[in-house]
Image: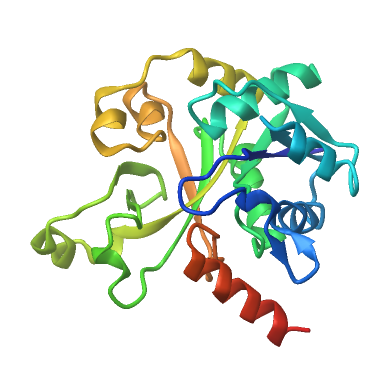
Amino acid sequence: MNEFIVIIPSRLSSTRLKEKALLDLNGKSLIERVYLRAIQSNAKEVFIATDSKKIEDHVKNFSPNVILTSKEHESGTDRVHECAEKLDISDDMVIVNVQGDEPFIDPETINKTADIIFKNKNASVGSACTLFKDNDFNDPNNVKVYLSDSNRAINFLRNVDPIDFSKNKAKYFQHVGIYSYNYKTLSTFVSLPRSKNEISESLEQLRFLDNEHEIYLVEIKELSIGIDTETDYIKALKILKNNG
C-alpha cells in the first residue's frame, strides 16, 4: 500500500504578516485551514511542525498531531526533517511537505505529488507546477521551472530571458511549492551544504539538482492562493465569504 504522511511546517514570525499562521480566516486560523485541507488527502496522518509554543497550544484545540521543533531552523524543510525524526518513521516512508500558508490547497494536488515517488523509480523528489497566467511570468517571486519532455526539472529560476522564453514557452511552468520524498532522501538533503545555485537564486530546491537528485513534477490546473501579504489575506477572506 502506498502510504504517505503530510508534514506542514509553521513558524510564528513572519516578515510581512505578523503571526500569520494564527490569522483568523472566517472563524478558523490559517494553519487550521491548511490542516483541514491536508486531512482530505489520502495521507495516513497529517502533522504540524512548529517552532512556537503559541502555535502548538492553538493546534492542540483541533489536533493532537503537532510537534514542537527548534527555533534555529533556516527553512521549512529543516523543520519538516526534525518533525519526521521525532516521529521515528522508516527510511522509505514518503513525506509530503505542504506549506503552512496554503489554506485552499487542493487535496488532490497532495495525492498527485505523493504519487510521483510511488510511480516513478527515477524520482528522488516530487513537486507540482502550473501554467503561467497573464504577466505572472515577469514576477521574480513566481518561480519558474524548466521541464524535460518527461516532466523532469532541468532548472528552477526566478528570471528568464524573454527571448529564451519565447523560444521554449512550452517548457516553462510556474513552480508550486509542495514536495514529496522519502525520509532517507530528506535526511540526505538536510545534511548537504547549501549549493552555489541555491544561494544565488535563493531557491532551496536547487540543492537537490546540484547534488544529482532528480525532481519530477505533476502539472495541476489551478494555483491555490498562498497568504504572504495583506492583499493575499483580504483576497482569501473574500473567497471564504463568497463560498459561505
Query: Residue 106 placed where, x, y %?
Result: 67, 63
Q: Is residue 90 visible?
A: no
Which corner quadrant holds the C terminus? bottom right
Residue 236 on image: x %, y %: 61, 72
Quadrant that contains the N terminus: top right
Q: Which color scheme is applied?
A: rainbow
Q: In which quarter of the image is residue 192?
A: top left
* One can see residue 60 in this view: yes
Task: Pick whichever, 177 or 145, lies toward us.
Answer: 177
* Side of 58 relative to 228 (left or right): right
Q: Which residue is rendered at x = 23% and y = 65% of the image?
A: 138
Q: Is residue 82 above or below residue 1?
A: above
For image coordinates 79% across by 36% down, the residue present is 56
Name the residue: 36% across, 38% down: 203
Residue 140: quadrant of the picture: bottom left
User: Residue 75: where, in percent of width, then height?
Assistant: 50, 31
Q: How many marks?
A: 0
**Outermost residue toward the bottom?**
242
Between 48 and 172, the one lying in front of the other is 48
Query: x%, y% of residue 10?
Result: 65, 40
In this view, the residue in front, 67 or 176, is 67
Which of the 4 image quadrants contains residue 47? top right
Q: Which of 204 and 12 is in front in this view?
A: 12
Left or right, 229 with respect to 84, comes to left
Q: Residue at x 69, y 33 (%)?
A: 50
Q: Is residue 60 left or right of residue 7?
A: right
